Image: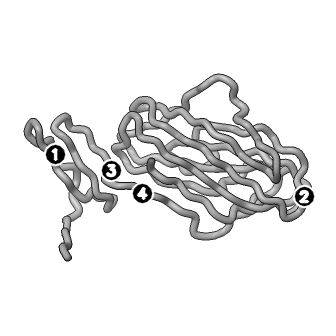
Amino acid sequence: MSILKLNVVAVPSTPAAGKVRVFAGTDKIVKQIDDAGLISILGRRATTMPAAVPTSGTGETLLFKALIPAGAQIGDTFRVTLFGVSSSTGTLLFRARVGANGSIADNQAWISTTSAAQVANAWAEVDVLITLRSAIAVQASGCALAGAVVLPQLIGAPATAAIVSTSQWYIDITCACSVGTFTAQNAAVEAM
């Protein structure tokens, strides 16, 4: 058995042509820097939900957020999934947001259509892909399911939401429930 110990360091200098450097960043994530100075995360990384989170009132509620470390590259894609259950007959409206805050103040990247009235203990799911299209923008697409009904993406034409990939940023999932509560039970963001 072999063990590799890496000291946590700031971003190292760009290596010579044809070389890469592997390092553990100050965020304790193993990364590589290539000869063009591009930094990427090694391996897959998933962020999961530590506890169930209910909506609060009828406004938009942050259910889940995942911190994305600085250095995401153009083309990096993240899959977000969230499962939960309704307490009563309310309608549901889900959003995926991105930005520096990790809150409902972040930029909207995706929104579902509003569900029909739910029934108590009906399950719902969100499944969204978020792809870095430039150093300052992401594009998202996906759908939600509420009971047996698909809630397609509300935004018809592809759109982008602003981020700053050279800094850490968040992917957030929010929900507004018109009556009662929707409680997120499980969620994850996975680098694809």
Q: What element carries label 2?
A: loop
Alpha carbon distance from label 1 to label 3: 13 Å
- Residue for badge 4: 45
Q: Is mark 1 on a helix, strand or loop?
A: strand
Badge 3 density bin: few <14, some 14–19, many ≥20, Cα 10 Å: many
Left or right of residue 17, residue 121 in this image: right
Q: Which mark is residue 119?
A: 2
- Determine whether label 4 and label 1 are within 8 Å by CB: no
Q: Is mark 3 on a helix, strand or loop?
A: strand
Left or right of residue 134, residue 162 in this image: right
Alpha carbon distance from label 3 to label 4: 8 Å
Q: Residue furthest top?
A: 157
- Amino acid tagged 1: Val
- Residue for badge 3: 41
Q: Which of marks 2 and 1 is nearer the N terminus?
A: 1
Q: Is mark 4 on a helix, strand or loop?
A: loop
- Amino acid tagged 2: Val
